[in-house]
Image (cartoon, rainbow, N blue to C red):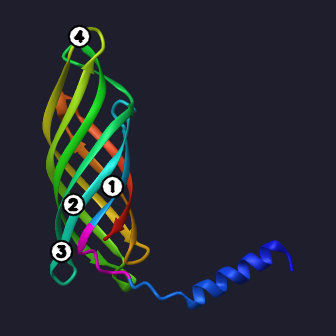
Amino acid sequence: MTKFALAGLSLSAALAFAPSAVAGDFSGLYGGIESAVDLSDQSVLVGGVIGYRMEPVPYVVVGVEGAYGSHVDGTRDVGGAITDFGGEWDITGIAGIIFGDDDQNMVYGSIGYMSVNYDTIDTVGSTHSDDVRFGVGIEHQFSDLLSFRVGADYAKPAGEATYRIKAGLLVSF
């Protein structure tokens, strides 16, 4: 028996005897990692998210989450000064609708407050900008423990429009 056949047989046996994970409950405490690409200036943001959601009526989810991230790369012209992105944090309200086979999918919208720090490159000092962020996305549960989501956000920190595409891997507690 080859290594691949043995590995396939072992995986099949493990899945057959593993307890089934029933998805469809997006309620509770969760946390995870998230990354975003700003389409306006090609900056990359990597960070973490933690939140709590509940299902007040069937198939409707509401919640709140907080996130912190750091820009890996990217600069922006803010008020005539070239700036380098620093850290960013936000607090966001989320509302979603559950759908699909076994209720494993959720489409959601979000609105929240964000704060971005900028380090000025051509002068000494740093500054920050606050704004309201709007977002939409879809999340898929692989199990009661693990889900994956993709989304898009819009904000206008420092007077410059920011369009982001983001992805996250979440773990429920």
Real-space CA distance between mark 2 and mark 1, rounded to the nearest whole angstrom: 9 Å
Residue 46 is left or right of residue 119, and the answer is right
Real-space CA distance between mark 4 and mark 2, rounded to the nearest whole angstrom: 39 Å
Q: Quadrant of residue 29?
A: bottom left
Q: Which mark is residue 124?
A: 4
**Is 59 in the magenta?**
no
Query: Sequence-wise, which precedes: disc 2 or disc 1?
Result: 2
Percent across and percent down for residue 173 are 31, 71
For disc 1, the neighbor class at 10 Å (few under 14, some 14 to 19, many from 20) is some
- For mark 2, what is the residue? 109
Comparing 5 with 150, the one in front is: 5
Real-space CA distance between mark 3 and mark 1, rounded to the nearest whole angstrom: 20 Å
Q: Residue at x 18, y 33 (%)?
A: 157
Q: Amino acid at mark 4?
A: Val
For disc 4, the neighbor class at 10 Å (few under 14, some 14 to 19, many from 20) is few
- For mark 3, what is the residue? 54
Q: Nearer the viewer, mark 3 or mark 1?
A: 3
